[in-house]
Amino acid sequence: MGIVRKTKAVTTVLNIFEAQNEAKSVVRLIELVKGVMNKTTVYRVLDRLEQEGVIHSFNGRDGLKWYAKCDEGCSSHKHLDSHPHFQCTECDKVECLSLDVKIPKLKNHKVDSTDILLLGQCEACCS
Amino acid sequence: MGIVRKTKAVTTVLNIFEAQNEAKSVVRLIELVKGVMNKTTVYRVLDRLEQEGVIHSFNGRDGLKWYAKCDEGCSSHKHLDSHPHFQCTECDKVECLSLDVKIPKLKNHKVDSTDILLLGQCEACCS
DNA sequence: TTAAGTGCAAAATCTTTGCAAATGT
DNA sequence: ACATTTGCAAAGATTTTGCACTTAA
């Protein structure tokens, strides 16, 4: 079961992520492939790619789901790159950060993953 | 301008948060006040209370906005309690954590706020 | 060949808006 | 009194579903 086929839709989506190493919201992605691919397909392709560990997602402050390419070593079981993300509140761009954030252990809890989203102004918008 | 009136709707919502110190999603809150208050009002009351710094919000992994009561010292300008949240992936409960997480400084970025969401199994669901 | 993937239209969710009526101070 | 708040109905926006058709392996 479940290998992701290299369809036209999959390729199109992956090309977008490879063009710039930058996160995109689902809505933005749907916009980018308008005319080429149905929005339903976009949702489904993103789901599959995330399951396979090719991309990962997180929730932006705007309440939308954002996706970005995964680093090497990701898999469906463990996203090694569950890194923090930075979203600019002015231009809305999202960057994946390679910061190592230490979270203290929680007693009596089993922590599976950590989502960290920093909000502020990016380099371009700071000036 | 802008003081939050102590209306029936405001009181109802605050009572819910004071009953248990636990975060709730908007959808859950709307459910809880069904018959008593219109959903539009729920959205508006939550907005106002958040602006006044009485409650704070964050985005759950489910894509919904979650709200919880603020600690002392919160205001509309600075939410002192921008603490991490823990959401159980089994029972969906959300807890506010009083963890101090250090985020390394980012060069050329202005960081205004930090959202941290831990996902896993809560104490009750661990057993 | 045939399981996996796609498009389309329609439904389901969640959120916002406009406006007239009600309410708090 | 009168600015705020509320309910309701309607519109927007995002996401999911069902099903017939197409495509990659």
Image (cartoon, coloured by chain):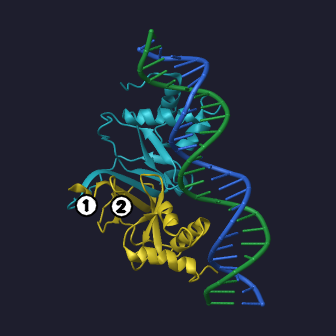
Chain colours: A yellow, B cyan, C blue, D green
Asked if residue B107 lies left or right of residue A33, the reply is: left
Give the mark, 1 or 2, whose residue is nearer the N terminus: 2
Residue under the point 46% across and 65% down: A57
Residue holding disc 1: A124
Residue C21 sits in quarter: top right
B120, above or below A6, in the image: above
The amino acid at mark 1 is Ala
Chain letter of the residue carrying label 2: A
Disc on res. B59: none
Q: How many labels does the image show?
A: 2
Residue holding disc 2: A93
Q: Position of residue A101 (x, y in %)?
A: 30, 62
Chain letter of the residue carrying label 1: A
The amino acid at mark 2 is Lys
Report the quarter where the C terminus of chain B lies: bottom right
Asked if one can make out residue B76 in the rendered structure from this viewpoint, the answer is: yes
Q: Position of residue A78 (x, y in %)?
A: 46, 72
Residue under the point 56% across and 80% down: A8
Asked if one can make out residue B122 in the rendered structure from this viewpoint, the answer is: no
Q: Where is residue C24 in the image (x, y as percent from the top left)?
A: 47, 17
Residue under the point 45% across and 78% down: A15
Asked if residue B92 lies left or right of residue A108, the reply is: right
Q: Is mark 2 on a helix, strand or loop?
A: loop
Residue A97 sits in quarter: bottom left
Check if mark 1's residue and mark 2's residue have beta carbons within 8 Å: yes
Q: Distance between the residues labelled 1 and 2?
A: 10 Å
Q: Which of B112 and B85 is in front in this view?
A: B112
B83, above or below C3, in the image: above
The crowd level at tag 1 (other Cα within 10 Å; few <14, some 14-19, many 20+) is: few
Q: Which of C25 and B29 is in front in this view?
A: C25
Q: Is mark 1 on a helix, strand or loop?
A: helix
